[in-house]
Amino acid sequence: MEVESPVREEGATNMDVEGGAPEGAENTEQKSEELLVAVLIDELQNDDVSIRLNSMRKLNKIAKALGPERTIRELVPYLSEFVDDEDDILVVLSEQLGELQDCVGGSENAHVLLVPLETLSGIEEAVVRDKAVESMKKIVTVLDKKQLEDYMAPLVKRLATGKWFTSRVSSSSLFEILYKTLSPELQSEMRGLFAKLCEDDTPMVRRAACQQLGKFAGVLDYKHVMGDVVPSIAKLTKDQQDSVRLRTVENCVMIAKLLTPEDRQAKILPVIYALCKDKSWRVRYMVADKFCSLTEAAGEEKKNRLEMVNIFVQLLQDGEAEVRTAAAHKVADVAKLVGETLTTEKLIKPIESLAKDECQYTRAALASVIMSLAGCAPKQVVLDQLLPQFLQLLKDEDPEVRLNVISKLETVNTVIGGVELLSQSLLPAVEDLAKDKKWRIRLAILKYIPLLARKLGPSLFEKELRDQCIQWLKDSVWSIRIAAAENLKQITAIFEAKWTSTHFIPEVKALAEDKKPGHRLSAVYVINHLCEVMGETACAAELVPMALALAKDSVPNIRFTAAKALANMAKYVTKKVVAEEISPELERMIQKDEDGDVVYFAKEARGGITDHLEGKTAMAAEKKEEKGQ
């Protein structure tokens, strides 16, 4: 639709922005800027959405060029007509309007921007409404008390009583920022409007009001929290829509913190108890997810804690797997909160049932926290009742469950104690996970191997896990081979170079001579990592010869990877080794290799070695000079 731009005055051209340049003061740069703005103004009406979108993003530049007076008189009313445009454009418009306060003359005139934003806050698209509300919140911060009462309060009132639910939804987010600055009469009116939103016929409005109720309560006086907010939260917890009720869970926590212990006991605890037993699994799921916060909100009184623990036990035994899983995730946190006595008396027994739960996700959730309970119960209870559940989870048919147990290895070691028992309990599970069909499981278990190495010691590690570490280097998945090579570096750092020379280097040499290119490439990765921890002598004697041999491999990928490894090795061996062995091989690759990629990486390696040696020479000269001084 053709719309004549209001930013052009009658008889004006595209370049007539800000009245044009003063007579005799024209210059190329100013005219260029004016032309750009004029083009942007025209593009606001372009049929192409992408062009209009681009121009809308530069609204600030257009407004600055027009000046405050013309922006207020022409641009803002013109933008108010854009409400029928594409949603993408309206989102940008809603954002940009919040940044135009300075372009309309600052706080004195910022209220004019509320006019198009009011319209945008009633749009059907939720993203547009949210951006419009955000921009209104920005503008509210620069308005004074009189402007808020004259412009913002009536706007909120119109939105809250609007015909369409969309405007009423948007209004619920504005009460909190506006309330404190208003007169007592207007504050009373705002409380009444918000209460009506909480009882609105449309579920979306009640849901939005419920979402903001806790924040609104935070700006009210205590008597109004008790008189207006508490009755509203009690009604909302009985709402027919579970999407409304589940949003009251977090509000209960926020409101409980505002009340005295007596009022909390009388008014909020019954609401919390009702939510914990709600008929909708979604509400119970939310309760389980926020259970620690709800328990804190219920207070430290012994009676309240006991009641909350009983409710938590019900959630652990809930008929819906999603609720049990959410509760299982919180077992350790709840145990820390309620103390050793209640944990022993109330929580240990349900945990035994969870370890055998039919849902794998519930068992996986329990597996991730079960050993964290060790500090929340007497040691004998842990050994007699928790440890059997832990061992059962280690043998679980689902790999995720077993992996979650092993991920808590530090805690496990504290509880189990002896290395022998640790190996008997963990190693069979590690072996199964190492051979799992899912490569991500195999990759996940890899990162715990160095930690296991520390716990087991060199002898037991060599006996139980050395062969598996070599097998990972032959895995069909590249990511696992890379991670396995990095693992050998970490294990060498733990057990030292001599141990690696005896137990790993012969296997790496076998890989370097293997018929399969993937295995030879794994050898290069290992060499590249081990050179950083093996020490100068071992590196020159054992790793450099392997790298030189692999640099002559028949597969180009292996040759150029070997070139990169040689460049890295040069940092960890003597200059003599570099000059007599590494550099000549790189020169040979540059001069004689037929593959372009190999030549390129060999040149890169040679350049890296040169830079490294020059850096070392410079450092040596500096140290010598310092000693001389």
Image (tube, grey):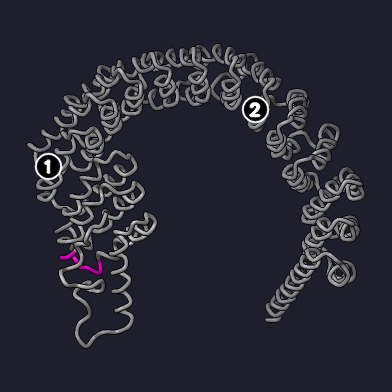
On the rendered image, what quadrant is the C terminus found in?
Answer: bottom right
User: Dot 2: within a 10 Å radius of its alpha carbon, few (fewer than 14), some, or many (20 or more) residues?
Assistant: many
- Amino acid type indicated by mark 2: Glu
Three-letter amino acid code of the residue under disc 1: Pro
Of the residues under marks 2 and 1, which one precedes in the sequence? Answer: 1
**Magenta residue check for 66:** yes
Image location (x, y in percent) of residue 322: 50, 21
Task: Name the residue that disc number 1 marks.
Answer: 154
Front residue of 304 and 323: 323
| Magenta stretch contains residue 415 | no
In the image, 204: left or right of 370? left
Label 2: which residue? 400
Q: Residue at coordinates 91% horizontally, 47% vertically from top-left?
A: 514
In the figure, residue 390 lies in which quadrant?
Answer: top right
x, y percentage for residue 431? Answer: 78, 29
Q: Residue 326, relative to residue 19: is it above or below?
A: above
**Range shown magenta:** 64-70
Name the one closer to the observer, 522 or 569: 522
